Image: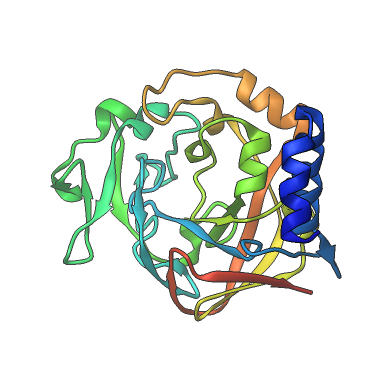
Amino acid sequence: MRTGDCQEFVHKATVTDVANFMNLMYSIQHLRVGGKRMGMNSAMRIAELWRYPVKSMGGERLQVAEVRETGIVGDRVVQVVNAAGRTVSSRTKPKLLGYHATLGVDGEPLVDGKPWREIDVRDAAGSDARFVRHDGVERFDVLPLLVATDGALVAFGYDGRRLRPNIVIGGVKGLDERSWEGKTLRAGEVVIGIQDLRERCIMTTFDPDTLVQDVDVLLKIRREFGGLLALNCNVVKPGRLKVSDEVTVSS
């Protein structure tokens, strides 16, 4: 359509005509070619990076992350255990979610701004609970990385922090992540292998700020997503990730 034609169209158009025209232009801008969305803003990018220095506690949002074979540096390096040495998590002790952990400049976790060794966690996790530090891969429930996508978070409809992802990818249409099992993500210097979708647990029912429980959250995940949301991933190639890095998916 030439400029003159556009001007004539605007002068003569009804509200319905304009709406239809805008819908047509949107559709053209978001055409898919070879399975990829086309358009000026179609690239997938790193939208959020998260680290949880103490397992089951609130985490910290990052702009840059160093990723090794064992995950994001500083992620879940301190855990809470009971007298038998078994990990205590917010699945059974949700008060742990009320603490906020960050990583200090010395590489040691801080809990609500204090060194983790100075924190008495027994009120939240039981009379025999204590902290231990361990940075082996055994500290993860499944794999070192959990990846979520903005499209799936929109469909989820709740605060994405309930899922506790390490990486959130932006620019993903709807539930496209559900077709990514077995594929590979590339972002910045990092290559990530996608294993499968994560089975969600009772932790998702607790509000990350108030700790108020809403069991409907997990019921919705089971009803609408088959109990599975976000992706279990491992690190194929370590490196540096930053927010805004472009992301590609390949078989």
User: Against 5, is 188 above or below?
Assistant: below
Q: Where residue 38 sits: x, y (%)? A: 74, 65
User: Against 38, is 229 above or below?
Assistant: above
| Quarter where residue 108 is shown | bottom left
Q: Where residue 97 sits: x, y (%)? A: 38, 33
| Quarter where residue 77 is shown | bottom left
| Quarter where residue 68 is shown | bottom left
Q: Is residue 202 left or right of residue 172?
A: left
Which residue corresponds to the image point at 35% horizontal and 40% vertical from the top-left? 83
Q: Is residue 42 left or right of residue 63?
A: right
User: Against 234, is 168 above or below?
Assistant: above
Which residue corresponds to the image point at 58% horizontal and 60% vertical from the top-left? 143
Residue 115 visible here: yes
Give the quadrant of the N terminus.
Answer: bottom right
Q: Which is nearer the eye, 177 or 228? A: 177
Give the quadrant of the C terminus.
Answer: bottom right
Q: Is residue 36 left or right of residue 126?
A: right
How many discs mark residues in the rendered view? Answer: 0
Q: Which is nearer the eye, 243 or 22? A: 22
Which residue corresponds to the image point at 78% horizontal and 35% vertical from the top-left? 13
Query: How is the structure coloured here?
Result: rainbow
User: Against 68, is 128 above or below?
Assistant: above
Q: Where residue 120 sits: x, y (%)? A: 19, 36
Q: Is residue 123 left or right of residue 249?
A: left
Q: Where residue 40 sits: x, y (%)? A: 64, 64
Which residue corresponds to the image point at 32% horizontal and 31% vertical from the top-left? 98
Q: Which is nearer the eye, 77 or 230? A: 230
